[in-house]
């Protein structure tokens, strides 16, 4: 058999749309598919704090020697403080280890390999719906994947009752993937009280939470967005946390993330880290340095950190402003359907409720790109494109 007899793989439901967008000759095209932040001018800028950190790195870097398999200790420490807060008991008790990974997707894949190799027989449970790449990552590692209810489409809300009822039936030891904040694709998160209940179920059923934490700071704030994650890191519990810094540092193409392991005790964390290192060594050997050097520098320098925090806050405020503008503009254009739920959602994404056919018409007729599921990247809207976007949606809803 030669390669020409291989079938073509289908285009990726997210990145494949951006490939199609890039080829689209329409000068008025709008890309609301992939989760990339755009500023008021429609650009994806490099953060000022990141540029300043890079200048420092360029000056001081004297070698491009390999990184340790799990990355640098300084990066691990800063990521732990960002994710778990200052002096979290798990950190104080030395029950936490962090491996620097290429992006959040890399962290998920390392976690998946670790589960497959060290925790045999476990099923991975994903929210319905979830990021379309989640099943790919876990299946690629050879893990069985199932779904638990999450979204109540009629109410545009979390179906907490159905979710918890299902979680209570899962076999002991199974893995539950939770979105730390800014659920992708719905933009709907559990409340702090609901996180507590989820944590209780994880303990009662002895389930392993795997938290995908890709949007810290884009919801309600860096600390606020970590509340759910922190509430699951209870004494005696094992937790896996996959961080991505694509969005909150704008480091999309540097591919920088982290896999943080919280274990019941120091012995557990050291054993898990040693196995995670073995997974990494057999995959990409050790991580690419640059993105982590930026994050270590920014988080370790009070002035750069303050600048970065202000930039994250500005990003968050712009996204929330666009949510309101989008809803108000739709209403001003005469759209009868109630889209006010968008204002209650958080993060980059909203589940618009547009059908596959409506999404298709938006693309074909108006060169507006959103996911087939109806997920819209609110962070891709601007004051310049929101009018045309709402005109097109109004027409599509009327036809
Ligand atoms: C998204 O959901 O659009 C982002 O997480 C980007 C990606 O890799 O899919």
Image (cartoon, rainbow, N blue to C red):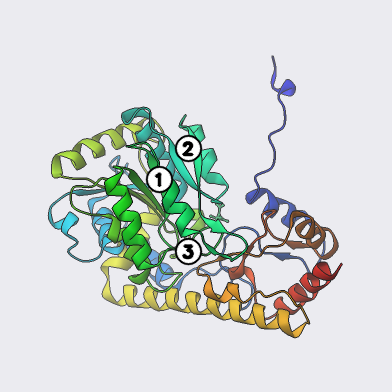
Instruction: Identify the residue position indicated by label 2 in the image.
Output: 138
Instruction: Identify the residue position indicated by label 3 in the image.
Output: 182
Q: Is residue 271 left or right of residue 247?
A: left
From the viewer's perspective, is residue 250 above or below residue 271?
Answer: below
Q: Are marks 2 and 1 in contact (CB under 8 Å)?
A: no
Instruction: Find the distance from the CA under tag 3 to the CA under tag 2.
Output: 21 Å
Which residue is rendered at x = 20% and y = 35% of the image?
271
Q: Is residue 105 left or right of residue 380?
A: left
From the viewer's perspective, is residue 345 above or below residue 372?
Answer: below
Q: Are marks 3 and 2 in contact (CB under 8 Å)?
A: no
Residue 216 on image: x %, y %: 40, 64
Callout 2 secondary element: helix
Q: How many marks?
A: 3
Residue 262 on image: x %, y %: 25, 48
Which residue is rendered at x = 75% and y = 77% of the image?
336
State ligand 1's quadrant.
Answer: bottom right
Instruction: Find the distance from the CA under tag 1 to the CA under tag 3.
Output: 17 Å
The answer to whether residue 144 of the structure is visible from this angle is yes
Earlier in the chain: of badge 3 and badge 2, it is 2
Task: Quadrant for the N terminus, please.
Answer: top right
Earlier in the chain: of badge 2 and badge 1, it is 2
Earlier in the chain: of badge 1 and badge 3, it is 1
Hey, which quadrant is residue 355 in on the image? Answer: bottom right
State the mark number for residue 176: 1
């Amino acid at each position: 058999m030669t390669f020409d007899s291989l079938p073509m793989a289908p285009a990726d439901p997210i990145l494949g749309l951006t490939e199609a967008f890039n080829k689209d000759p329409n000068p008025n095209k709008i890309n609301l598919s992939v989760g990339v932040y755009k500023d008021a001018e429609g650009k994806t800028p490099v953060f000022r704090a990141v540029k300043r950190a890079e200048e420092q790195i360029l000056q001081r870097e004297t070698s491009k020697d390999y990184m340790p398999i799990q990355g640098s200790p300084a990066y691990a420490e800063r990521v732990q403080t960002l994710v778990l807060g200052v002096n979290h008991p798990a950190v104080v008790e030395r029950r936490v280890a962090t491996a620097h990974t290429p992006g959040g997707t890399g962290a998920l894949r390392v976690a998946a390999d670790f589960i497959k190799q060290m925790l045999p027989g476990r099923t991975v449970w994903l929210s319905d719906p979830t990021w379309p790449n989640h099943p790919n990552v876990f299946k690629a590692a050879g893990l069985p994947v199932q779904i638990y209810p999450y979204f109540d489409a009629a109410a545009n809300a979390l179906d907490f009752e159905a979710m918890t009822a299902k979680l209570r039936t899962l076999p002991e030891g199974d893995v539950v993937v939770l979105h730390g904040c800014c659920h992708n694709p719905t933009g709907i998160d559990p409340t702090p009280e609901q996180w507590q209940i989820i944590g209780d179920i994880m303990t009662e059923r002895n389930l392993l939470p795997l938290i995908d934490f890709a949007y810290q700071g884009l919801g309600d704030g860096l600390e606020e967005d970590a509340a759910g994650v922190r509430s699951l890191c209870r004494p005696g519990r094992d937790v896996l946390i996959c961080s991505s810094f694509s969005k909150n540092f704008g480091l999309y193409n540097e591919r920088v993330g982290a896999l943080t392991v919280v274990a019941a005790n120091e012995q557990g964390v050291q054993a898990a880290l040693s196995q995670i290192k073995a997974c990494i060594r057999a995959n990409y050997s050790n991580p690419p340095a640059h993105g982590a050097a930026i994050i270590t520098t920014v988080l370790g320098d009070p002035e750069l950190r303050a600048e970065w925090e202000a930039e994250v806050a500005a990003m968050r405020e712009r996204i929330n402003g666009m949510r309101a503008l989008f809803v108000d503009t739709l209403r001003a254009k005469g759209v009868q359907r109630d889209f006010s739920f968008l204002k209650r959602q958080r993060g980059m994404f909203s589940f618009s409720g547009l059908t596959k056919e409506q999404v298709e018409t938006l693309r074909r007729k108006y060169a507006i790109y959103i996911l087939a599921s109806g997920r819209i990247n609110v962070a891709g809207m601007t004051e310049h494109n929101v009018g045309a976007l709402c005109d097109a949606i109004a027409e599509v809803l009327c036809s």
